Image (cartoon, rainbow, N blue to C red):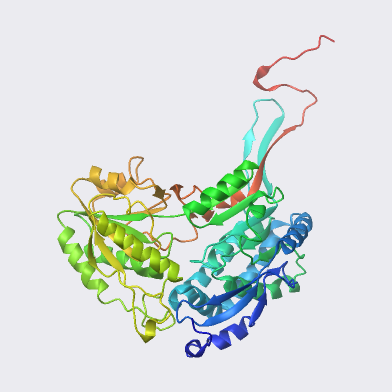
């Protein structure tokens, strides 16, 4: 790996780091405006773009964890009693602050994670959008009023703040996933403890540097928004098992999610799980093939195939199979692979060499299981690719859901399969353990409506004539089966961050019992 930043400086990374308050060595824990002198092992953050060292982080330790949780507990008692619209005003200011730092933060996301600059900017915009959403939500945390069967009684339900929300985020969206949880949690009256991926810790430190000014200006109590940048060695099972944390929101692999769910479930805590996707697009004989092509391209190679909503499988009607395959192969040939901050680049690097090896292993398994590699699948070489993290996106032709097809490979590996009937297409589509995002391209309403029906897609997200990737924040985001069942972002996803209470008020001088029960003492 490089230890200099000469290549990075071509793209102004030195100025970005200075603007975002990123030092050569950075503390790994804060309770909002106060940073701890953390003593954990040093983690070095290297860019997958060019292998250059970006910065170092002194990890938060178990002692730091205890200080943060204790501070968060105390802050919750204050924060929950601040009116929700007032909490929303803090979130509004955070959104404005993010607007000011959109460009440098987007560039850091791109450089530390490897997604192209446009996607880095898009991720920060997603943070801004969820702030706007949460501000409106702060005046709409409402329950229902119900009629009582008892005379002179009324019933209603209401939602109360839950407490500490633990957020465990993944490398592929180093800042947006935190914002989804943190902004909604904050307006709901919760306090936030964030454990970011160890692969992109500098992004989390930058975010907290950005928002600290807002917290300080508004005298937000220490402990409302907390960061614990530390590995599982220090902050792992103890975080999951802590009864002081009623909700753990975790984004990551299905393997990680199963462990989170088991440990949190053992203490009867709540877990919000956003896990793997193995997303498919059905392309019918009635599809607009040019429109489908654009969706497939972004879905399959955007973020170098490292989105949980990335398109992994194409289920194509036999009548258009060869035509669409030819279009796709030709389009892949025009994809520019290179440095994520280069404006010409559409596909940047994978996160690290481990991800590259997983990609290569998957391709070997495709061959062993009878699949055919149509193009790509190699590691890029040359001066521009010296980090060793760049791969050529791969298209593989398979028959049915092979074992490897049912496994999500977090890389630009796309499987093509042929179908004859819609029954067959839906069976192929649903025949994987994951159930996050899905799509169908068709101009036939009988096909599209069936895809959205009870017997259609079994995913949490089902789209018509748009791709699988790039969900809007207005709708609830999440999936079924091994995707974990959690919902974040829009719609009524806010309810998971609150505890629900049913209230009955008697405004009579009598005490009638429900269901007409008589319970007389005879006095």
Relative to 58, 107 lies left or right = left
Percent from the top left, x then y, of residue 6? 50, 90
Q: Is residue 99 above or below residue 321?
A: below
Corner quadrant of residue 61: bottom right
**Left or right: 339 with respect to 150?**
left
Residue 188 in view (yes/no): no
Residue 85 in view in this figure: yes
Q: In terms of depth relative to the viewer, which is nearer, 101 or 428? A: 428
Residue toward you, 383 or 205: 383
Q: Quadrant of residue 199?
A: bottom right
Q: Quadrant of the C terminus?
A: top right
Q: Count up the numbered dots.
A: 0
**Pick the front one: 364 or 146:** 364
As drawn, which residue projects farthest toward the right? 523
The residue sitting at the top extreme is 522
The image quarter containing residue 421 is: top left
Residue 271 rendering spot, x and y as whole percentages: 58, 48
**Residue at 61% in and 77% down:** 56
Q: Residue at x 71, y 30 (%)?
A: 153
Coordinates of residue 55 in the picture (x, y in percent): 59, 80
Could you say which is closer to the camera, residue 471 or residue 416?
416
Q: Residue at x 29, y 50 (%)?
A: 402
Residue 422 in picture, x, y percent from top left: 23, 45
Identify the residue at horizontal 39%, vertical 63% (top origin): 358
């Amino acid at each position: 790996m490089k230890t200099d930043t000469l290549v990075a400086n071509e793209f102004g990374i030195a100025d970005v780091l200075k603007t975002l308050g990123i030092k050569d060595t950075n503390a790994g824990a804060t309770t909002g405006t106060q940073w701890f002198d953390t003593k954990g092992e040093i983690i070095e953050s290297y860019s997958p773009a060019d292998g250059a060292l970006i910065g170092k982080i002194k990890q938060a330790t178990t002692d730091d964890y205890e200080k943060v949780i204790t501070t968060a507990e105390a802050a919750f008692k204050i924060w929950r009693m601040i009116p929700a619209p007032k909490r929303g005003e803090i979130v509004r200011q955070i959104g404005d602050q993010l607007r000011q730092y959109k460009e440098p933060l987007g560039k850091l996301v791109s450089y530390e994670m490897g997604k192209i600059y446009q996607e880095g900017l898009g991720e920060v915009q997603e943070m801004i959008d969820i702030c706007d959403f949460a501000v409106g939500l702060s005046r709409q945390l409402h329950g229902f009023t119900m009629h009582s069967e008892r005379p002179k009684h009324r019933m209603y339900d209401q939602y109360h703040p839950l407490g500490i929300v633990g957020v465990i985020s993944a490398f592929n969206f180093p800042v947006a996933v935190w914002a989804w949880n943190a902004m909604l949690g904050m307006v709901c009256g919760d306090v936030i403890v964030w454990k970011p991926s160890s692969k992109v810790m500098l992004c989390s430190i930058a975010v907290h540097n950005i928002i600290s000014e807002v917290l300080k200006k508004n005298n937000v109590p220490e402990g409302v928004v907390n960061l614990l940048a530390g590995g599982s060695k220090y902050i792992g099972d103890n975080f999951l098992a802590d009864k002081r944390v009623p909700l753990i929101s975790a984004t990551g692999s299905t393997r990680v999610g199963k462990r989170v769910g088991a440990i949190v479930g053992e203490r009867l805590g709540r877990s919000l799980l956003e896990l793997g996707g193995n997303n498919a697009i059905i392309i019918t004989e009635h599809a607009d093939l040019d429109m489908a092509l654009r969706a497939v391209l972004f879905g399959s190679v955007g973020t170098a195939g490292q989105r949980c909503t990335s398109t992994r499988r194409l289920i194509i009607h036999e009548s258009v199979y060869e035509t669409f395959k030819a279009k796709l192969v030709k389009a892949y040939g025009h994809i520019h692979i290179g440095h994520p901050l280069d404006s010409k680049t559409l596909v940047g690097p994978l996160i690290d060499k481990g991800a590259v090896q997983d990609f290569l292993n998957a391709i070997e398994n495709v061959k062993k299981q009878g699949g055919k590699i149509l193009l790509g699948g190699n590691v890029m070489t040359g001066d521009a690719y010296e980090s060793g993290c760049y791969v050529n996106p791969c298209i593989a032709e398979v028959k049915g859901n092979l074992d490897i097809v049912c496994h999500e490979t977090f890389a630009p590996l796309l499987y093509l399969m042929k179908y004859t009937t819609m029954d067959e297409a839906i069976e192929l589509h649903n025949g994987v353990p994951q159930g996050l995002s899905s799509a169908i391209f068709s101009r036939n309403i009988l096909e599209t409506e069936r895809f959205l029906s009870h017997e259609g897609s079994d995913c949490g997200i089902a789209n018509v004539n748009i791709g699988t990737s790039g969900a809007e924040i207005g709708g609830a985001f999440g999936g079924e089966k091994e995707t974990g069942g959690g919902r974040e972002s829009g719609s009524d996803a806010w309810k998971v961050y609150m505890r629900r209470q049913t209230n009955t008020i008697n405004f009579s001088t009598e005490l009638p019992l429900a269901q007409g029960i008589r319970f007389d003492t005879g006095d």
